[in-house]
Amino acid sequence: MNVIAYIKGKIKINTNEVRIETSTLCNFSCKFCPNKNGFKRKKEIMSLELFTKLLYKIKAEAPEITTCTFSGMGEPLLDNTIEDKIKLAKKLHYNIILLTNGSLLSYKKIKDIDLLKISFSTFSRERFKKLTGKDDFYIVLDNIYHVAKTHKVIITATLTENFEEEIEGLKKLFDNKVYALEIWKPHNWGNWGNYRLIKSQQKKLVEGLKTGQFRFKLMEQLICVVLILMGSYF
């Protein structure tokens, strides 16, 4: 969300959510993410002062925003002021969502979070190491199981191959343990990757579907599918 342009009335945004990137630091090196693979921006943590200024301004001038999401190109739990930022968002009566790789989870850090979205893209320890550059499969899995006892958790799996096998494996890991499993294709991040169909390709695909011209595996074409594993999505 372009907060400044929105506040000046230059952009009309139909949303109740603001996403704030408080960290461009990350402790993983995921192959489908440009953070450690060509990411050019400065690696840093947003100051508590700047975050406070932004959030109060949004509260005053964009009252329709009711949800504050901590997300972006980095890992928000590497921010040593994240607890203060979450407390401020809670004080201002925002619903709070946090996106994380799950390696640094603790109850103290996330106790005021309303929804956790945790990136976990394979049921295989070996594939996890290849995807993330870290041998933290069981650490993250154990963290997920623990926080799911006290928080609403959605697993976000970013898949590029082995779709059917990975989905079935992830369902077995998380069935009746988390609220939902999101299956995503990686972002293209501009022209960094080539994972998702561009608009012209999407149009061709839709036309082909209508005429029966194309045969394909569903999961290899969709950008996101949500599987409800327990309860409701919201």
Image (spheres, rainbow, N blue to C red):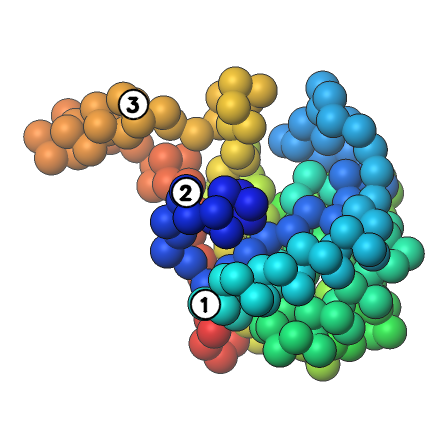
What is the secondary structure assignment of the residue under circle 2? loop
Residue 39's mark? none
Residues 96 and 124: in front is: 96
Q: CA distance from mark 3 to mark 2?
A: 31 Å
Q: Residue at position x 66%, y 75% from top?
A: 92
Residue under pointer 2: 10
| Amino acid of disc 1 | Glu
Nearer mark to the viewer, of 3 and 2: 2
Q: Residues within 10 Å of mark 1 (few under 14, many from 20)?
A: few
Quadrant in which residue 201 is drawn: top left
Q: Does 163 sit above or below residue 100?
A: above
What is the secondary structure assignment of the residue under circle 3? helix
Nearer mark to the viewer, of 1 and 3: 1
Residues 133 and 165: in front is: 133
| Amino acid of disc 3 | Gln
Quadrant in which residue 214 is drawn: top left
Residue 96: image location, x then y, percent: 63, 68
Residue 159 appears anywhere in the view: yes
Nearer mark to the viewer, of 2 and 1: 2
Residue 201's mark? 3
Q: CA distance from mark 2 to mark 1?
A: 16 Å
Residue under pointer 1: 64
